[in-house]
Amino acid sequence: MTDPIGDVHRAEYGRAVAVLTRYLGDLDLAEEAVQDAFTVAAERWPREGLPPSPAGWIITTARNRAVDRLRREAVRGEKEAEAVRMRGDEPVGDHEDLLRLIFTCCHPALRQEAQVALTLRLLGGLSTPAIAAAFLVPEPTMAQRIVRAKAKIRDAGIPYRVPGDDELAQRVQPVLAVLYLIFNEGYAASSGPALTRDDLCTEAIRLTRMLAGLMPAEPEVQGLLALMLLIAARRPARTTVDGALIRLGDQDRSRWDRALVEEGQAIVRSCVQLSRPGPYQIQAAVNAVHSIAPTAPATDWAAILTLYDQLMAVTPTAVVTLNRAVALAEVHGPAPALEIVDRLPLDGYYVFHTVRAELLSALGRAKEATAEFERAAGATGNEAERAYLLRRSRLG
Amino acid sequence: MKTYLLSIYQPDGPAPEAAVLEPIMRGLATLTKDLQDAGAFVFSAGLCPPDTATVVRSGATGALVTDGPFTEGKEHLGGFTVIQAPDLDAALKWGERMAAVTTLPIEVRPFQQ
């Protein structure tokens, strides 16, 4: 099924909002204008075909719509409309605009849950239901979170700019957290028929690459980039031709993207030399260990367990504990791992149920494993993931 | 330009000794001077302790007056400065200096436009 407008929306929404925010100086007006443009596209494109540059068409149409809207509003009037029209003729620095928007969305005066929601909404162009699903919160809660965050940006005067050199190291931390969340949303889409939303991964990598270029001396930015590259390298081996999921252990490693693997490994090596470890660098190192193993049984799980011990020292969260338990099961067997997993407060998180099911299966508790796989299948909104889990549940 | 309220929150209890207070007041005076020189200063005030406060409410039978602050807490509003700044980052920079001088948390809050 092809959905050209949907494709353009996913790929270009954030860029369009970023550019329009520079023209208009207001996030709500920018989003409104971009949404207007997509409404016009939905009417015209099926009839007239896609324009040569859909992204350019959306930005131009959004700008014209905004100018019309401002003209109609007596308070703003012709002068402001003209100013917007003139600014529209400046050369467009998309990267700069996107960075500006991301630093605004990830401003420390906003709480992290608001930063994440705003970035996914404004840069990722995700719908509020998709964002709500990704963060396991009710839709009205997420909608309210976004409205409040935008209101704070406007009322408190959070500036639309990239921070100066003196603040950059500190201000980049929330940006990294948000980019990684976008990447994960792209890699394992929370809803919809496809397993991945490659455009989101691509966008997350693109933004992270840009940040990495901007901050070459910040190892965590490099670490995050390496982490994304090493995970994305497995993308070609992760699904069958009909889109079904293939787990890491079952993947045909010859299909991994060697260029991405080598780039990721090279960044991990240069990070190790800097000797300033952090959570993203450690996770990148875990994935580098996977990427070195020629076959799944050749994986150095002891090295991975050591890296997870380091990660637990920096970020002792339930999800890290869950991932560490997977490594622990490989090194010390499923029984001690299940003991740890059973204590985690992650009920409703499909990865938790999947790990638990695999451990039960490894312990020969087939009936419980089947039930747990079904629970996992019920907890994911991703159809490819669900199909895999239901297939797996029948095996016990 | 936007207008911001910088509120100083201080712990309840007796005021610090003069030896502690004196450098803080000197620091605040310097900060006020810098705000004025930068054209950012609007207004500033220090408040008497919360036990000097009175709350008045409008009731069916007339005004209801109670002794003490509106909320009892471990901290209270000790004083405030109103400033003008181009954006929140600029306002937070002034707030950061005020926090360093007073060693107290500063709430930065925008005025309605």
Image (cartoon, helix red, strand yellow):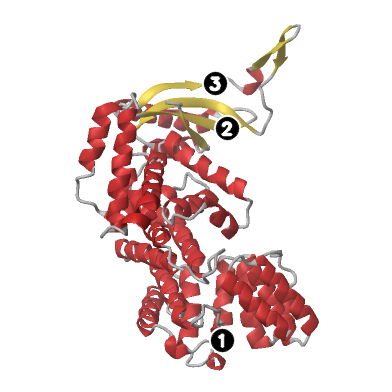
Q: Secondary structure beneath disc 3? A: loop
Q: Which residue is mark 1?
A: A249
Q: Nearer the N terminus, badge 3 or badge 2?
A: 2
Q: Which residue is mark 2?
A: B10
Q: Is residue A101 left or right of residue A368?
A: left
User: Horizontal and vertical percent for residue A151?
Assistant: 48, 37
The amino acid type of the residue labelled 1 equals Gly
Q: Residues within 10 Å of mark 2 (few under 14, many from 20)?
A: some
Q: Is residue A145 above or below residue B17?
A: below
Q: CA distance from mark 3 to mark 2?
A: 11 Å
Nearer the observer, A163 or A2: A2
Query: Residue A275, located in which quarter of the rendered image?
Result: bottom left
The amino acid type of the residue labelled 2 equals Gln
Q: Are marks 2 and 1 on the same chain?
A: no
Mark 2 or mark 1, which is nearer to you? 1
Tell me what residue is drawn at x 38 percent, y 85 percent: A258
Q: Which residue is mark 3?
A: B47
Q: Is residue A322 above or below residue A238?
A: above
Mark 3 or mark 1, which is nearer to you? 1
